Image (cartoon, grey):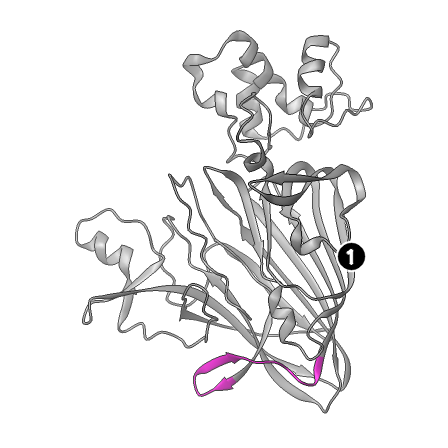
Amino acid sequence: MHGMKKLFVFATVLLCAVTAWGNDGVFFVNGNHLVPVHETDIALTSEVLAITLGDDGYASVDVQYVLTNRGQEKTVTMGFEASAPYNDYEPFSPQGIHPHIHDFTVVMNGRQLTYTNAVVKEELDVPCDFKPLDLKRWKSYGEVKMRNGEDLPNNSLLYDAERDSLVSFAYAYYFEARFLPGRNTIHHTYRYLMSSGVDRCFHVPYWLTPAMRWANRQIDDFTLRISAPHSCKHFCVENSLFAQSQFVVTEGVGKVRTTKCYDEQFAEIVVRNGTVTWHARNFKPTDDMHIQSAERLYFDNYKLGTFYDRSNNYMPGSYMIEMNQSPWQRRILKNLPYANRGYVFKDKKLQRYFSQFWWYMPDPQWKADTRDFTPREWELINKGE
């Protein structure tokens, strides 16, 4: 597959765990290389991609493919590349197992497949060739520096001392897929620690363009589902890729609108305990997908609570400057967790305040049940007025 490219974040980075993820692609084996190819017999008939956003910082991916082999039985190699963590203290894994990807499974035609891990070279805008790096030569640059007494936690580079050179790397997962004539199914799952930074609470990239390598050069029937089953998530998806049709709220409570930001069109979405779905036939992805928390859409609006997220790595802006908080600000912070769940306030001033935010979706049936409040939300409540 097309490699997961590193997202370089300017300004101060709070955390950038796994910077991207991707779809499965098809390769042929050339010596020790996995070379991406255009498959001529196997067509991607359908793909159902389900992404679940959690408050623990993780996203879960569940993707189900139907592929049709128009030729004879054959075995092809499929691969998945995950960029090394950036600005992260996790140690380098010479076994090629990404520290922030968990529960990676592949089931084909009802049989679970084994997969191989490797550490591979990664270059910006260059497809990964999946050639394992010689780890007798290449060592973790961060660990080399720390052994020399320097505090450099960035383990996203490898260092060749003999040649005094550096290289970016990724962790690769690849497996052999045996395609029978006709219909074949692949079910692929994993959990993933989402990226975050000063301009976003979470970021979920997903590479769709590898679909163009299959025989039909498209996904005949594509369904995308983005869910927040036990939370409320406010996020945006660049609109140009999904102009073919609209996102629709199919479970729970939510709403969708088109928003313009920095001369780009976005689908802005808020969903509470539910799912939005996007569907298209004969889908030819020309770009890759990025799901990002929606605070980037509101940089010009500094009102407290303009954007809110329940996750523990999110902290409302004014909450970070406790010395400058007024009693009214502390009261807003204390009530943010309630507003996020749709509480209808008896206090008219609070009700007017939260009603101005697009993410606020009143639920007269919600009775202030606090059992699902997160530790960060209890901090807001306990420090409020």
Q: Residue at x 58, y 36 (%)?
A: 297
Place of residue 236 in the rendered image (x, y in percent of width and height, measured from the top left): 63, 43
- Image quadrant holding the C terminus, namely top right
- Image quadrant holding the N terminus, namely bottom right
Q: Residue at x 65, y 38 (%)?
A: 233
| Front one among 187 and 256 | 256
Q: Secondary structure at mark 1?
A: strand
Place of residue 67 in the rendered image (x, y in percent of width and height, measured from the top left): 73, 75
Q: Which residues are magenta?
A: 29-42
Q: Which residue is mark 1?
A: 279
Place of residue 40 in the rendered image (x, y in percent of width and height, measured from the top left): 67, 85
Drawn side of residue 204 relative to residue 344, left or right: left
Drawn side of residue 129 relative to residue 189, left or right: left
Three-letter residue code for mark 1: His
Q: Vertically, is 284 above or below 41?
A: above
Q: Residue at x 39, y 64 (%)?
A: 169
Q: Vertically, is 6 above or below 291?
A: below
Quadrant in the picture for residue 357: top right
| Front one among 141 and 249 | 249
